[in-house]
Amino acid sequence: MNYRFFALFLLLSTPLFAQEPSASRITRHIEKLASDQMKGRGTGSRENAKAAAYIARHFRKYGLKPLGEDGFYQPFMAKVRRVVVPDSLRKAANVIGFLDNGAEHTIVIGAHYDHLGLGDQGSSLDANPRGQIHNGADDNASGVAGLLELAQYYTKNSVKEPYNFLFMAFGAEELGLLGSRHFLNHPTLPLDRMNFMVCMDMIGRYNPERGIGIGGYGTADAWPTVFKDVTAGVKFFTDRAGNGGSDNAAFYAKKIPVLFFHTGGHPDYHKPGDDPEKIDAKAEEEILKLEIKLINNAMKLPKMTFTAVQ
């Protein structure tokens, strides 16, 4: 064997393989974001800011252009509606990175990075939530891991796509979609340049009997063409509705087509037991590969036309 040739082949081919979604990287992201040291990433907490910095650091590493109002950050104030502690106003931020392919229109990919902290901001379903770390491994460290993997994939694939990409990690979703609504009311990219939005919220607890649900199928006439003949390493099903679930609802309200990926509820939802060791990273890897197929199919088509779901 010509070992020099083999070594050269490995050197040249590694970036092609490295860009693919990876269960091991997914696991590392989730273990970081949903560790006990991050104390549940409650809005306004030091740990929530650390999570935002972790995302911004990766956006910078991938070569994304900052498209916030302060570098990668778009700061805003979030109000805790279900007040459990006196501080009802808290600092929050969206983290926004732009992949500029010189195209007229842009695909938005988003996930929220906040969770319930120490059970003191409301929404916990635990009987005695206060003081307990709500790690939020599935909700929504799994979605952020997916966001980072897709950002890496599209920045490292050496292909100039026919659409730009806007990667966004939303703050304060658990307080009522506050981050996505703030962005849409104060956009750093014109809304009419957005083709569609992909939202990932809770994609880490795959149930092979249920499959991965994909909402928003009815929000554009083009979605059936995008999905035609698509196969995946996981079972999936579609739902027409686009106005529920997570930050996708805010984009739907602005008449932007959406897809919403969700592996379904479980007994640890909004409880302290939503921990990293319960994540199925291999299944999430397959979900992200499915998303890439759908996004790539969508990029073969003109800008989508929004349709309201009756």
Image (cartoon, rainbow, N blue to C red):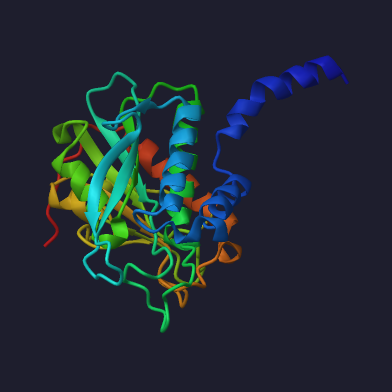
Could one spot residue 143 in this view of the protein? Answer: yes
Foreground pick, 8 / 95: 95
Quick one: which residue is furthest to the front in this view?
A: 86
Q: Quadrant of the C terminus?
A: bottom left
Identity of the residue drawn at 29% across and 49% down: 91
Callout count:
0
Front residue of 273/289: it is 273
In the orientation shown, which residue stands out farthest toward the right?
1
Residue 168 in the image: x percent, y percent? Answer: 34, 41
Front-most of residues 169 and 304: 169
- At 27% from the left edge and 44% from the top edge, which residue is drawn? 197
Question: Quick one: quadrant of the N terminus?
Answer: top right
Compared to 18, does 259 lie above or below? below
Find residue 45 and report its horizontal and vertical position in percent. Answer: 39, 54
Percent x, y for residue 307?
Answer: 13, 50
- Which residue corresponds to the image point at 56% horizontal and 51% vertical from the top-left? 32
Compared to residue 234, the image places residue 110 above or below, namely above
> Which quarter of the figure has residue 239?
bottom left
Q: Position of residue 53 (x, y in %)?
A: 45, 40
Q: Is residue 217 visible?
A: no
- Where is 89 relative to 257, above or below? below
- Quadrant of the image occupied by residue 295: top left
Quarter of the figure with residue 81 = bottom left
Q: Is residue 305 above or below residue 157?
A: below
Judged left or right of residue 142, residue 309 is left
